[in-house]
Image (spheres, grey):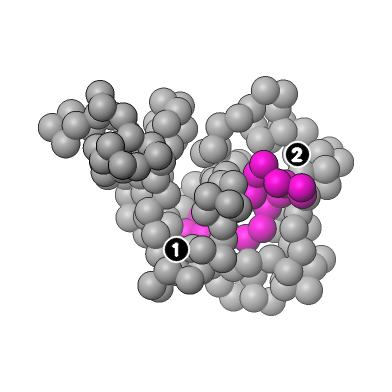
Amino acid sequence: MAYWLLKSEPESFSIDDLRQKPNGIDAWDGIRSYQARNFLKTMQLGDLAFFYRSSCPVPGIVGTVKVVKTAYPDKTAWNPNEAHYDPKSTPERPIWYCVDVQWLSTFKDVIALRTLRQIPELKTMQLLQKGNRLSVTPVTAQEWKRIEALCLTFPQAQAFKKRL
């Protein structure tokens, strides 16, 4: 199993939006970075990810999700009415991909970016590297465990452990 961090702006798609979908499942689509797309294409069923909210007053990790469908062509690239339309991507030659994720947990408290930056064990985490703007990044098992340990200090600890 691999671990990931998926970023979204709350105005575009929030963890509550995902939770409210049927069975808490939706496509993680609209990715238009080749490197992030390549990460999506390596995801496997059952991989876990932190849901990170960005471009907001308190950016940070707000919950967890699980990959329930591996990479497939992102149809939003083919629709001129979609914000993520790309005329170079076609059904015959797709460029962009998505995965389906399922909501697992929402944290009572945000694990703020500023908190993550203060943890020495996370200093090499891709999210925390200068200039990193990718919406999909890998998380090492050690990083996952350290953040999970941080989560267990929060009141939502039992729900977090049950869902994983």
Q: Quadrant of residue 142?
A: top right
Residue placed most toward the observer, 35 or 95: 95
Q: Nearer the viewer, mark 2 or mark 1?
A: 1
Residue 142 in view: no
Q: Is residue 27 above or below residue 84?
A: below
Seen at 26% across and 27% down, the residue is: 87
First to last magenta residue range: 48-66
In the rendered view, does 98 fall on the left or right side of 93? right
Q: Quadrant of residue 94?
A: top left
In the rendered view, does 138 fall on the left or right side of 107? left
Q: Quadrant of residue 149?
A: bottom right
**Residue at image mark 1:** 102
Residue 158 lies, in percent from the top left, at: 69, 76
**Residue at image mark 2:** 122
Residue 30 lies, in percent from the top left, at: 41, 41
Amino acid carrying mark 2 in the image? Leu
**Looking at the image, do the residues carrying marks 2 and 1 touch, with CB atoms under 8 Å apart?**
no
Seen at 69% across and 66% down, the residue is: 107
Q: Earlier in the sequence, mark 2 or mark 1?
A: 1
